[in-house]
Image (cartoon, rainbow, N blue to C red):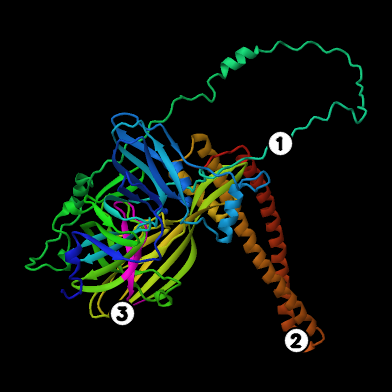
Amino acid sequence: MTRSGLGPLSQVALGVLVLSSLLGCAKHPQVRSGDLPVKRVVVYRNGVAYFERSGTVSDERVEFQLREENVGDFLATLAVMEQGGHSVKAASFPVSMAEQQKDAPDPQLERALQEWSGEKKDPRKLRNVTLELDGKKHDITVGYLAETPLWRPSYRLIVGKGGEASLQVWGIVQNQSGEDWNDVELALVAGAPIAFESTLGDPVVPQRPIVSDEGEVIYAVPEGGSTYYQEQAAPAPAEAPAAEAMEEGAGYGSSAGGMAKPSARYKRGSVDEDDYAADKATEAKPTAPPAPAPTMATLGPRDGSRLAQVEVQSGATRYEVPHTVTVPDESATMVLLVSQKVPGAAVHLFAPDPGVPDSSRHPFRVARFKNASGGLLEKGPIAVFEEGAFLGQGMLSSLPVKAEAIVPFALVRDLAIETTSRWDQRDVRFYAVRSGMLFVEQDQATLTTYKIQNGDQEPAKLLLRHPRSADARLHNPPAGTEDNLAEHVAYVPASVPKFGKAEVKVEERRPVQMNVAWESVEARQAISAYLAAGKGTPGQRKALEQILAQAEALAKIADGEAKLRREQQELEKSTRETRLSIEAIEKNAAAGDLRAELTGRLRQGTQRLDQITKELVELGLRRSEVEVRLREARQSLEIPAEK
């Protein structure tokens, strides 16, 4: 027994783990045939399995006994393969119409009502299907689909040193067919082909319309009609003959005829070792320390040929178990499918989860590894081990070939993280000119700051799972950032010294198009940058240069007007206060000097106000002139957006 308590795994790594699970009283098999035993089972992830029964037959017929609930699926998917000719004449089965009356409901509707009410067909009731043969000796194989509990994956990841880990993939199969699977070829498919429940075994008599002959009695007098006389119009030109029109479109909707050839039986193979070796060559190869005795990191089968062979066919991953398997009825079998070295390690990941409140401030411990198995890894539980110790459990999502998995299995409280975000606008760019209107593009920036504090005596490295907008881009992300567009997240690396702090900033920018005034600051900046970059045709550049000159002139006029109006407001306030002061000392004879000073100040203010009014009028006239020139320059200008 090792420190982890997993010593028995070394004894079952090369074999099959059979878990007995008696799930109820005995029942009839789904399909029974005394002549053809089950030789092959392919289990899918959608509640069905493909069965093959094989044997040598010399009789004139082969009998199958089926549960009533399995007849439809059997008839809909029955396939007969044989060597030495075509000996199958027909497949017959009895149908009882005793209970099928004219006024009986549609059997499909009745079936739906039974399912809705929870009623199912009696599993003890059997129906016979007979294959009629020619009586000669033949090696025959019969394939069909039947309902079967889906197979379920289970994973083990043993994290080593130097960025390498050991991955084990187990498949759990349950036999609820009603018969033992003795020495069958077993295959597990990580995929769910379309498979529907068929009712071909149920008799269906559709309702037909009733036609009666009631004679030719006219029950109502028909009403007549009239039309107005019109002059004869000139004859229309002759149209093309219908034959020519048909000839022009003769090829429409045509297709090659003929029946589709049946696909060959799945070919067994192995992982493309050349592709995998090339991938491994591009990765760092850690030096493994000498290990005199087997440990968890070296746990695995001694004979690799005993593992399942992995193939990807028609987009589905297929695990072919190379040895025969026996699965008794009403029991489960766990088969070791994959055991191999993969790039992987246990790291920290900050990914707040609503189901774990403390994860908003503390990171998870996660297992990160690459799928080098050559096939799809289905969703399933995964147990993580390291240096002879159990670290935790997590749930692996569906992982395509060569993709990387990040599976949280524990929460780390030695690291505390605080997140803040702020919004801003950045970088105005020329976008387009449409109908004399200018459109610019501006970035709406979101800056997220992660403040990390390490309370451990060891330096920490972690990944920050940064949720990002689907229509935004990362602007100058930290080195090593992995942008996952499919999941709308980015994984940002961070390092924190022992008992230290660190700060990581992630900026996202989302471009937004908007219409702005030609004389605005944004417009002048965008046009200046557009011209400086040498973009546009000579005619467009000339028009933009004129527009920019007029826009800058308008901006100067606007600044001058604003400055004069501010001065005007201040002088009006000052002269109003001066008048009030003069009125207050008007009857005071001793305040003659002060009155004279105030009167002079009022005179100067009034003169300046008159001058300001004159300048404002002049600027207004100048502004009107420039606006007319600007309108003329942009009137026929059209610049499309860059692709």
Disc 3 residue crowd, few under 14, some 14–19, many 20+, Cα 10 Å: some
Q: Which mark is residue 308?
A: none
Which residue position is annotated with label 3?
414
Q: Nearer the viewer, residue 289 or 22?
A: 22
Q: Which residues are magenta?
A: 393-416
Cα separation between marks 3 and 2: 81 Å
Which residue position is annotated with label 2?
591
Secondary structure at numbered mark 3? loop
Cα separation between marks 2 and 1: 119 Å
What residue type is disc 3 on?
Asp
Q: Which mark is residue 209?
A: 1
Q: Nearer the viewer, residue 400 or 634?
A: 400
Residue 13: percent from left, percent from top: 19, 61
Residue 409 in magenta stretch: yes
Locate residue 100: give its quadrant: top right
Secondary structure at numbered mark 1? loop
Residue at the image point whose x is 31% and y is 34% from the top: 82
First-in-chain label (3 vs 1): 1
Residue 537 in magenta stretch: no
Disc 1 residue crowd, few under 14, some 14–19, many 20+, Cα 10 Å: few
Q: Nearer the viewer, residue 327 or 277?
A: 327
What residue type is disc 1 on?
Pro
